Image (tube, coloured by chain):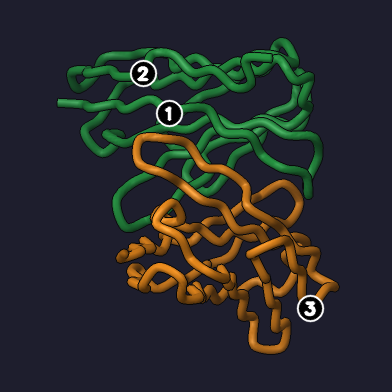
Chain colours: A orange, B green
Amino acid sequence: GEDVEQSLFLSVREGDSSVINCTYTDSSSTYLYWYKQEPGAGLQLLTYIFSNMDMKQDQRLTVLLNKKDKHLSLRIADTQTGDSAIYFCAGSHNNDMRFGAGTRLTVKP
Amino acid sequence: NAGVTQTPKFQVLKTGQSMTLQCAQDMNHEYMSWYRQDPGMGLRLIHYSVGAGITDQGEVPNGYNVSRSTTEDFPLRLLSAAPSQTSVYFCASSYPEGHEQYFGPGTRLTVT
């Protein structure tokens, strides 16, 4: 298994870009994921990236993977108040998935 | 499709009691898993199953048992509840690794 670390809090103004960072220890992770959790709900998959990719873009979301530094980031462009939630990064290898502690994103109007 | 369903939504147990948390999915997913979520610790994998009749341990399996007699159901059993098992429990399902995991709404368990 691996350790996955994230900063716990991020606050941005509406319309700005948000960048949530994550570091992981296990370079054998096959897939790396970003999940979103809204209050009282389960986790919802936002996007994922295969370990042999450097970048993936999906509408307002951009995922960057730096395998050398074992660093994963999620950029949310034009952040909206509806983006306020907890964001988890996770890595998986052989069906064993490990999550970070989550970053609480607060979007101020 | 109902997706992933979990029952109960809330449960209070006394130390030493046993109970089963139910999880079911109607998407014919092979992979199912149980996580617990504790403040400041994210989700930790308890047990998972890659298909009916096959289960394996995750990161924090002690104190929990699972079985997978059908594709649809993956119950989690606490044999003798302890206060350290107070947590929110999530069940998830997916096709094999690399596909989206669908999470249930969670069960909030308190052990006194």
Badge 2, how many Cα within 10 Å: few under 14, some, many 20+?
some
Q: Residue flagged by tag 1: what amino acid is it?
A: Gly
Looking at the rendered structure, which numbered label has been put on residue B9?
A: 2
Q: Which residue is mark 3?
A: A54
Badge 3, how many Cα within 10 Å: few under 14, some, many 20+?
few
What is the spatial separation of the Cα atoms under label 3 and label 1, in whole angstroms? 33 Å
User: Which corner quadrant of the image does residue A108 belong to?
Assistant: bottom left
| Local secondary structure at mark 1 | loop
Outermost residue toward the right in this view: A52
What is the spatial separation of the Cα atoms under label 2 and label 3, in whole angstroms? 40 Å
| Residues beneath discs 1 and 2 located on the same chain | yes
* One can see residue B33 in this view: no
Residue B75's spot in the image, x, y percent?
Answer: 54, 17
Q: Which chain is mark 3 on? A: A
Looking at the rendered structure, which numbered label has been put on residue B106?
A: 1
Q: Which chain is mark 1 on? A: B
Residue visible at 46% across and 56% down in the picture = A83
Q: Residue flagged by tag 3: what amino acid is it?
A: Asp
User: Which corner quadrant of the image does residue A80 belong to?
Assistant: bottom left
Using residue B56 as the reference point, say whether residue B58 is left or right of it. left
| Local secondary structure at mark 2 | loop
Residue A24's spot in the image, x, y percent?
Answer: 58, 73
Outermost residue toward the bottom in this view: A68
In contact (CB < 8 Å): disc 2 and disc 3: no
